[in-house]
Amino acid sequence: MWLLSALVPLLRLYLCGIRVLLYQMFNRSFEMPVLPKQNGRVAIVTGGTRGMGFETARRLASLGMHVIIAGNETEEGAAAVRRINEECSKGKAEFIFVDLTSLKSVRQFVQMFRDRGLPLHVLINNAGVMLVPERRTDDGFEFHFCLNYLSHFLLTNLLLDLLKESGRQGRSSRIVNMASATHYAGEVNLEDLNKRTVYSSHAAYSQSKLALVLFTYYLQEQLTAGGFAVTVNAVDPGMVDTALYDNLWTLARMMKKPVANILFRTPAEGASVSVYAAAASEMEGVGGCYLYNGRKTQSSDLSYDTELQAKLWKKSCKLVGLQGF
Ligand SMILES: NC(=O)c1ccc[n+]([C@@H]2O[C@H](COP(=O)([O-])OP(=O)(O)OC[C@H]3O[C@@H](n4cnc5c(N)ncnc54)[C@H](OP(=O)(O)O)[C@@H]3O)[C@@H](O)[C@H]2O)c1
Ligand SMILES: *[C@@H]1O[C@H](CO)[C@@H](O)[C@H](O)[C@H]1NC(C)=O
């Protein structure tokens, strides 16, 4: 029983990976359209210190945005900010600490950001971990669930009023959720979101990414109903050569290396889908999409289950201590 519960999600996740690699074998990364200048706009990028988050922050700053990198490594954060500010004269980067494994830290981050008195036009929920061994956060949440999904759920909700105030018709504020093809393998078990019954790191990662897609669609419905100039999309970067794969088993890691050299995208290529969602004119006013390789793509059947979306939203509000929408 245990073996099956651990093996099935593992196989499903690796199958997702193989499908993506086959696609990448025959398709180049999409071509980015010319992006409009973003002077005067402010963005937050979680996990902007390295990997795709860094490339996203750097690209947005080069378009003239004021970019706040949110991360839990202060020194790495300072180095990332220095690099970006040396490179672009137009944009501006700064670092604010957040540890996404702590809801308290998320609240403190929001307070620190608010104290700056800045508007907010773009929120990129990018940070994530993959396949960490069974672990709980101080609040008692499963690690992937909290870091990849729940903290971003809270962060987004706490910043939503600022995003609404900063958006205009024709110049919407934009939220971008970093999903993954592994969401196709995902299931959300509302009775056991923290995976206490049987732990599979593969199921935990897939669940966190499916949760992000469900959250994206539900939030867009609310924003549209309220007539707000805010859009939210989920993006899928393909398979990208970053430190995310550090937790693979040794054998898988050894096999990954030569494959990654040939078939994985670079962090800058992977980041392009986030940048596209955050800045392209083509995406103005467009929300509720799952974007893959620069195109709107069908996400998993489960992700369109409106009842599941609503239930997950309600449950998430409860877990983070928020009143409904
Ligand atoms: N690589 C892929 O093939 C792939 C495919 C699909 C989706 N994704 C998604 O893309 C996103 C970016 O991943 P990546 O591939 O660029 O990996 P990465 O290089 O490992 O970047 C992960 C980022 O998350 C941040 N982070 C980790 N723990 C944190 C914490 N406790 N608090 C705050 N920030 C934390 C890290 O910041 P610090 O350095 O400050 O800890 C880092 O900047 C993730 O959500 C991932 O699931 C990746
Ligand atoms: C940041 O978070 C990751 C877990 O996501 C952890 O491994 C790392 O030690 C943390 N860094 C610091 C400085 O606490």
Image: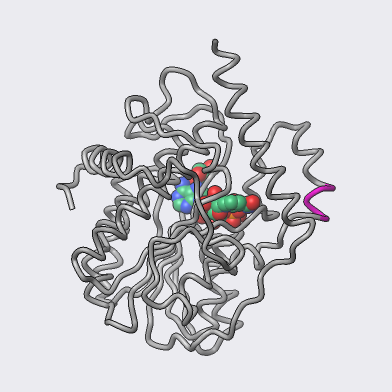
Q: Is residue 166 depicted above or below 214 in this figure?
A: below
Residue that protrudes farthest toward the top in the picture? 1
For image coordinates 64% across by 41% down, the residue present is 16
Residue 302 placement: quadrant: top left
Left or right: where 269 falls relative to 181: right
Count the labels in the image. Answer: 0
Q: Residue at x 36, y 34 (%)?
A: 138
Residue 223 falls in image quadrant: bottom left
Quadrant occupied by the N terminus: top right
Drawn side of residue 105 relative to residue 133, left or right: left
Q: In the image shown, does 192 or 228 lie closer to the viewer?
A: 228
Of residues 204 and 31, the one nearer the viewer is 31
Q: Residue at 81% x, 48% y: name it.
A: 259
The residue under the point 50% across, 37% down is: 186
Q: Confirm whether the magenta stretch covers residue 261.
A: yes
The residue furthest left is 323
Q: Which x, y percent locates residue 29?
A: 69, 67
Colouring style:
one colour
Measured as percent of width and height from the top left, residue 119 is found at 28, 77
> What is the x, y in percent for residue 293?
61, 64
Whether residue 7 is situated above or below residue 278 in the rendered picture: above
> What secondary structure is the magenta-colored segment mainly?
helix
Whether residue 206 sits left or right of residue 159 in the image: it is right
Of residues 29 and 161, which is closer to you in this image? Answer: 29
Residue 5, position in %: x, y?
Answer: 54, 19
Magenta range: 258-262
